[in-house]
Amino acid sequence: MQTNLFAFRIFAARTMRSRIDILKGIHPGKLIDRDLKKRNLSQRSFAASIGEHSQTLNAVITGRRNLTVEMALKIEQAFGYEEGFLLTLQAYFEIAEYKHHLQSLSVEGVPNIRRSLFWDTDFDAIDWGRYRDAVIARVAERGNDAEKTEIARFYGISTATVKAK
């Protein structure tokens, strides 16, 4: 009996780890919202069932507020998640947000390229640090040689790297 319990705990830990690896960087509120919809539960009724205010639950679901330990435990128990699952997701989300912030700070200014290369987005709202790889790929695909040289200068990489993408 002891061996079966030990094997189950190892299996559960591996299952939780692989599920977290898949969901890394996603705010736990998105997962909570998805599960509420799957179970056909309203936010208001679920919040009442776990003893929380519906506004608080809505703020977590929409990403305006982080999960507290108390709320995470209540939700995990209600949905049958492993203890600590939602808080682990919250931690990975905060790490991803911090990394995005650092990427945003890594570059200053705007490259001197045609706005029409980014016709499908607001050119003035592009976060040049965070979306570095996407910008390089777009310029490599659609830009002329002068724009490829400008992006290489802007990001401090070789022109060959830009052309290779």
Image (cartoon, grey):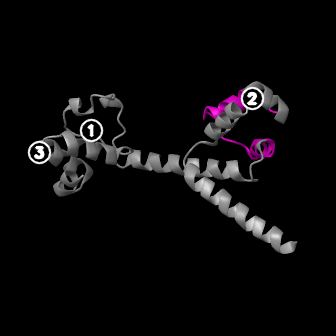
Identified at 21% across, 43% down, the residue is 141
Q: Residues within 10 Å of mark 2 (few under 14, many from 20)?
A: few
The mark closer to the camera, 2 or 1, is 2
Q: Amino acid at mark 3?
A: Asp
Residue nearest the observer in this picture, 100 or 77? 77
Locate residue 128, reporting x and y percent. 33, 41
Is residue 120 among what the camera can see?
A: yes
- Of callouts 3 and 2, the N-terminal one: 2
Residue nearest the observer in this picture, 91 or 106? 91
Task: Place residue 66 in its image quadrant.
Answer: top right
Q: Please say whether residue 60 is one of the residues in the magenta stretch.
A: yes
Residue 110, numbered label: 1
- Per the image, the residue denoted by label 3 is 145
**Alpha carbon distance from label 1 to label 3:** 18 Å
Element type at mark 2? loop
Q: Amino acid at mark 2?
A: Leu
Element type at mark 1? loop
**Contact between labelled residues 3 and 1, with CB atoms less than 8 Å apart:** no
Residue 123, numbered label: none
The mark closer to the camera, 1 or 3, is 3
Residue nearest the observer in this picture, 103 or 146? 146
Identified at 63% across, 59% down, the residue is 17
Locate residue 52, reporting x and y percent. 80, 32
Magenta region, residue range = 52-78
